[in-house]
Image (spheres, rainbow, N blue to C red):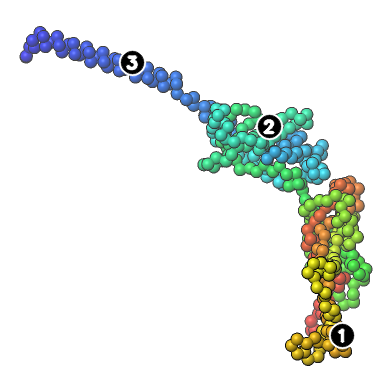
Amino acid sequence: MVLLPPEEVTLSFSSAMKLKSLVLVVAILAVLAMAAYYLQRPPVITNLDPRINQPVFDPKTLDKTAEIHLTDQSKTVVLARQPDGKWIVPSYFDIPVDFSKLSRFIDDLANGRIQRLVTANPERLARLEFKDTSVALLDSDKHTLWMLTLGKDAEGGGRFVRFDDEKKGYLANLNVYVESVAKNWVDTSLLNLKPDDIAGVELTFAEGSPVVASRAKKDAPWTAEQTPAGQRVKSEQIASLLSTFTGLRFQDTSDLTDPKVEAAHQHSRTIKLTTFDHRTITIEMGRKPEMKKPVEALKPEVKSQNAPGAGPKPAVANMVSTSSPAEPGAVHPGLETGGANAVPAKPEEPKVETIPAGPVYAFVTSSDPSATINALMKKQAFQTFDWNFTNLPQKRDELFEAVPVAPKK
């Protein structure tokens, strides 16, 4: 066993005490650093916000909704629920809303989910571009039930959203378009029948009597009054008419006093549909026809004989000679005197301006006095697609075909 001198023992003991103190100081500093980090760390609020992983919209809110306000680019359209539950567009002549479009819009809202809270910082919130693109649901007292403001699209997908007047911005996997044009929300259907509903069809022509075809039931053959001998009703033609007019739609509207509307009345044809439940729908369809208008020829400017430097105009008749050419420098007798061999110059063909046909309008009435279409027709004239009119049979013969001859046995 080796004994150290007393001086070395004292030095070793002192070094150990210093090392122990250093370790203690480091431990205390580590504890203080952890405490400082814990106290100063950013609050972990993503998982604490109640909106996270929740749907953007709860469809049950729609049960209490009387109006939907859709705003974008400083334009707002209102969709209003009627007492019978139907939706209309008040700013577009109270025409019913396209319910399939409204359903898709609500589904898009309900299918979106909040992914995370982006910020509650006002400066960062401004960078998410929350402007005037919004959806608001109001109750019958005009109180806001729910409101969503849409910001810009996120670079990684999704869209930034903000609820009501909250100073929070969220990211949602939302794919929705806010349509703020009233016309684009209306149901463009003028008629919503099925071909199997129709028991009778009547079609007028510019010349001759109308064709009236009918059937006893939906799968029975069509028959017509005054069918030509040896012929029958052309079922394919009737089927085409039913396909067009039972689902008739419009593409635009005009004021009832528009001259084009009056012209359509004056150049129209009529289609009558009779249903198996004895309703009659009358469709008057027409347009202002194409017109050709002669254009007056512009008179050439004649230089005044009294103008400075203007010499006397030669008295040359507007005639062309059929005789042989004259010698150089000679004046042809036919041009000088209008001799016997001279003939008049061929007159120019008159110029004609073509004025195109006007738009096609459909005027629909139902024998059912409570039908919505009757009220709509008193508000506006409904412009339909040109082919609905131009594809109509032009002659009675087009609705008939020869009866097939049975093969000889």
- The residues bearing labels 3 and 1 have C-alpha atoms spaced at a distance of 132 Å
Furthest residue in direction bottom, as rendered: 324
Residue nearest the observer in this picture, 372 or 350: 350
Looking at the image, which residue is at 43% across and 21% down? 38
Q: Position of residue 146 (x, y in %)?
A: 68, 32
Specify the label residue 337 is tagged with: 1
Residue that label 2 marks: 146
The Cα–Cα distance between marks 1 and 2, rounded to whole angstroms, is: 96 Å
- For disc 2, the neighbor class at 10 Å (few under 14, some 14 to 19, many from 20) is some
Quarter residue 129 falls in: top right
User: Mark 2: which amino acid?
Assistant: Trp
Q: Is residue 345 visible?
A: yes
* Residue bearing mark 3: 28
Q: Earlier in the sequence, mark 2 or mark 3?
A: 3
SS at circle 3: helix
Q: Please give left or right for residue 112 compared with residue 325 in the image.
A: left
Three-letter amino acid code at disc 3? Ile
Q: Earlier in the sequence, mark 1 or mark 2?
A: 2
How many numbered discs, if any? Answer: 3
Disc 2 to disc 3, C-alpha distance: 53 Å
Using residue 375 as the reference point, say whether residue 181 is left or right of it: left
Mark 1 burial class by Cα count in 10 Å: few <14, some 14-19, many 20+: some
Viewer-proximal residue, 155 or 140?
A: 155
Q: Residues within 10 Å of mark 3 (few under 14, many from 20)?
A: few
Amino acid at pointer 1: Thr
Judged by depth in the image, the label closer to the viewer, 1 or 2, is 1
Q: Residue 162: give x, y in percent of width and height.
A: 61, 32
Horizontal and vertical percent position of residue 281? 88, 55
Q: Quadrant of the N terminus?
A: top left
Q: Residue at 73% x, 44% y: name it.
A: 181
